[in-house]
Amino acid sequence: MAEQEKKRPEPAAEAEETCPAEAAGSAGTAEAAAEETVSKADLEAALAVMEKAKAEAAANRESLLRVSAEYDNFRKRTVKEKEALYADGFAAALTAVLPVIDNLERAVAFSDGDGLKKGLEQVMKQLADVLAKENVTVIDPLLKPFDPALHNAVMHEENDGYDENTVTEVLLKGYRIGDKVIRHAMVKVAN
């Protein structure tokens, strides 16, 4: 019996050893399952954060593209406005000078001394060179059809020697810079 008693505790010890191991195994499985559940939740949260970040990045990119396009349009518009301001300022300055040119032309036409006429002609040539350098051209409508965009008809005449609406006389020269008319030519037109 003593041998039996000795043998019995051993199986009981084995049973106790197995039970705690099984208990530990089942507890380990529960912990592993809990870890998997936590990591799935963390993964889902991380994916949600990532999706939100992607949406934010796309919105920021769209905003950046829009602002970039607006800036590019602003820059182009500013360049055009500067060019227009320069052209308008130059046209205003030239408009102030045109009466001086007109008076010099009249002085040349009515001067009676050769020295005075020669001096005035040199001044006129110099002014013509300055105007040519600045791309200013004279509107020369003589014997051409009347164009209200370039000419200002201040007189009409009945004359069978000319076609209808033909400029017969230029009373005051017109000027333009490129396609922009600075001053319309004052003309007489045949009816």
Image: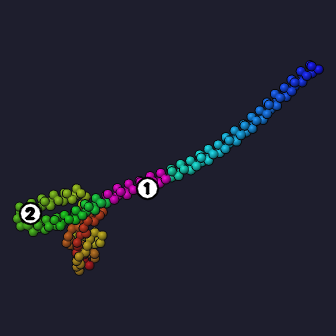
Camera-nearest label, 2 or 1? 1
Q: Quadrant of residue 136?
A: bottom left
- Between 55 and 120, the one lying in front of the other is 55
Q: Quadrant of the N terminus?
A: top right
On residue 182, which mark appears? none
66 falls in the magenta region: yes
- Depicted 161 relative to depicted 125: above or below: below
User: Badge 2 is on which residue?
Assistant: 117
The residue segment tinted magenta is 63-83
Q: Main secondary structure of the magenta part?
A: helix
176 falls in the magenta region: no
Q: Earlier in the sequence, mark 2 or mark 1?
A: 1
Residue in view at x 79 percent, y 30 percent = 21
Identify the element where label 2 is drawn. helix
Q: Quadrant of the C terminus?
A: bottom left
Q: Position of residue 180 (x, y in %)?
A: 29, 64
Please indicate, yes or no, whether residue 141 appears anywhere in the rendered image.
Answer: no
Q: Residue furthest front?
A: 2
Q: Residue type at mark 2?
A: Lys
Residue in view at x 26 percent, y 65 percent = 182
Neighbor class of circle 1 (other Cα within 10 Å; few <14, some 14-19, many 20+) is few
Residue in view at x 24 percent, y 64 percent = 92
Q: Position of residue 74 (x, y in %)?
A: 39, 56
Q: Position of residue 134 (x, y in %)?
A: 24, 57
On residue 70, which mark appears? 1
- Depicted 27 relative to depicted 111: above or below: above
